[in-house]
Image: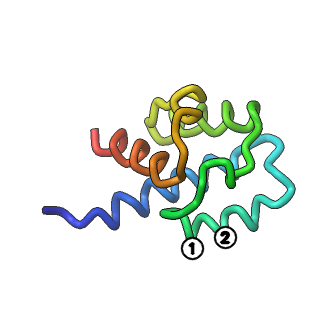
Amino acid sequence: MPDPAPERAQALDALVDSLLAQSVPGADIDAVIAQLRSQAETMALEELGLESLGLMEVCLHLELDHGVPLTPDDVLLMKSVRELLDAISAHQRR
């Protein structure tokens, strides 16, 4: 069975890249990214601090730049960053 660590790292990089691509990132984006890098597996999705426009931008960036077709509705059904990373990883494997 292949090591999931590289896939998880790619998914995390895609998420961080998409968070940084927001036109108006949250005021504490650096703290959010630091937390993501150290605690992504245990973070609640709401801890990303995304508002509706930011969520739309992140989803658009994930699709256009990383080939991950997630909608804001898809993401809103998720409870944790782990679920989001799982979805990103699954799409990246295709």
Q: Which mark is residue 58?
A: none
Q: Are marks 2 and 1 in contact (CB under 8 Å)?
A: yes
Quarter where residue 93 is shown = top left
Residue drawn at x 54%, y 39% is 62
Quadrant occupied by the N terminus: bottom left
User: What's the mark number on residue 38?
Assistant: 1
| Above or below, 75 relative to 38 | above
* Type of colouring: rainbow
Element type at mark 1? helix
Q: Residue at x 60, y 64 (%)?
A: 36
Q: Quadrant of the C terminus?
A: top left
37 or 24, which is in the foreground? 37
Q: Mark 2, residues whose alpha carbon is within 10 Å: few (<14), some, or many (≥20)?
A: few
Q: Which residue is mark 2?
A: 34
The structure residue drawn at horizontal position 34% and vertical position 58%, both measured from the top left corner, is 7
Q: Secondary structure at mark 2?
A: helix
In the image, residue 2 sits, relative to residue 51, either above or below, namely below
Residue 1 appears left or right of 79: left
Identity, as a three-letter code, of the amino acid under mark 1:
Ser
Q: Position of residue 42 (x, y in %)?
A: 52, 63
Q: Looking at the image, which residue is at 33% across and 43% down?
A: 90
| Percent of width and height locating residue 58 | 63, 39
